[in-house]
Image (cartoon, helix red, strand yellow):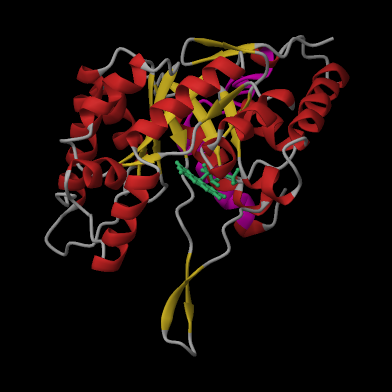
Amino acid sequence: MAELTTSYLGLPLANPFVVSSCSITGTAKGVRQCADAGAGAVVLKSLFEEQITAELGGADGGAGSAFAEEAQRWLAETARVNGPQDYLTLIRQAKAETDIPVIASINAVTSQAWVEYAGQIQHAGADALELNIALMPLNLKEGSDQIEEYICGIVRGVRKATTLPLTVKVGPWFTSLPRIVRDLVDAGTDGVVLFNRFYQLDIDPVALKPAPGYQYSSPAELPLPLRWVAILSPQIRTQYSLSTGVHSALDAVKALTAGAQVVQVASALYLNRVGVIATMIEELQRWLDDHGYPSVDALRGQLARAGFYQPEELERLQYIKALTGVS
Ligand SMILES: Cc1cc2nc3c(=O)[nH]c(=O)nc-3n(C[C@H](O)[C@H](O)[C@H](O)COP(=O)(O)O)c2cc1C
């Protein structure tokens, strides 16, 4: 039987399925359900920077932060009920009740007040830290270089504050993903999570109000992170965690083939149930056995080994095939 064990950010994992940061991992009970279903690791629900700054007496609004007054009030209230101290308790409970790696997550906007929490998160027993960096570039005067430098500054700040393994979760909207990923690695991250799937906005055209959009991904969203893990992993050495659109074991097979160290799953758990992780693990095992791979690690990065060394080649080839209809 193929070996499913692997490692992520230097942590030993029973398999490459990591539960993404989401509401399920926001309670110790949810974390236990994930562990019982066989998850290799969990990323806890993000601690939002506003929860920290509200507790400290108000957000200071760094690059890209544009919260309406109502949202600030809501966040301040949430911070009181569910603030950083509760988060540290969640880390301790998750560690006490399971034996899988527990990765904490901070949703970072500014690079100041909250950095000290990275140290507290480490002290509470988290095994690693994921920085969920989701800046909305709303300022007309701010260019991409400034925003990217800002993001790297956040990573440098956290790198100094903790010796925990560190990974950075970003969205896909950068002009040059190769450059930002390289810069993040230079800033001190041990890995990247490609990609975050931001809160979806919809509009109610009758009430003329913003409304929450559909929150769950579909397997049709997998090609985007798949492409970028395939392009970046042979070029920039870091740990790639593929997130968005993983709904089956076959999706995980594709991600590993592209070079992902692990995959993260969230929507699949909401659309099915947490127990779907066990099915994915079983099916991954069967796929590896059927295709003669002795382990998850043996499958990883096979796309590059099969000759797609040059990202230009990979991209150009796929483009031409799509245009000409040649398969
Ligand atoms: C209900 C819900 C809550 C989420 N909360 C967070 C969060 O707190 N922090 C975060 O980094 N991502 C959060 N996400 C995003 C997921 O971690 C994940 O990146 C995204 O859903 C794409 O993965 P998927 O296709 O497996 O769903 C959330 C997703 C859902 C569905």
Q: Residue furthest front?
A: 81
Q: Residue at x 54, y 23 (%)?
A: 94
Q: Is residue 168 left or right of residue 282?
A: left
- Res 299 → quadrant: top right
Which corner quadrant of the image does residue 247 belong to? top right
Q: Please, is residue 70 above or below residue 20 in the view? A: below
Front-most of residues 83 and 117: 83
Q: Which residues are magenta?
A: 298-322
Q: Is residue 38 visible?
A: no
Residue at x 73% of width, y 24% of height: 36
Q: Quadrant of the N terminus?
A: top right
- Find residue 7 and report its horizontal and vertical position in percent: 56, 12
**Could you say which is closer to the camera, residue 232 or residue 220?**
220
Q: Position of residue 318 (x, y in %)?
A: 59, 46
User: Does residue 98 sit above or below 215 in this rendering?
Assistant: above
Q: Tell me, yes or no, if residue 305 can be seen here.
A: yes
Q: Is residue 21 magenta?
A: no
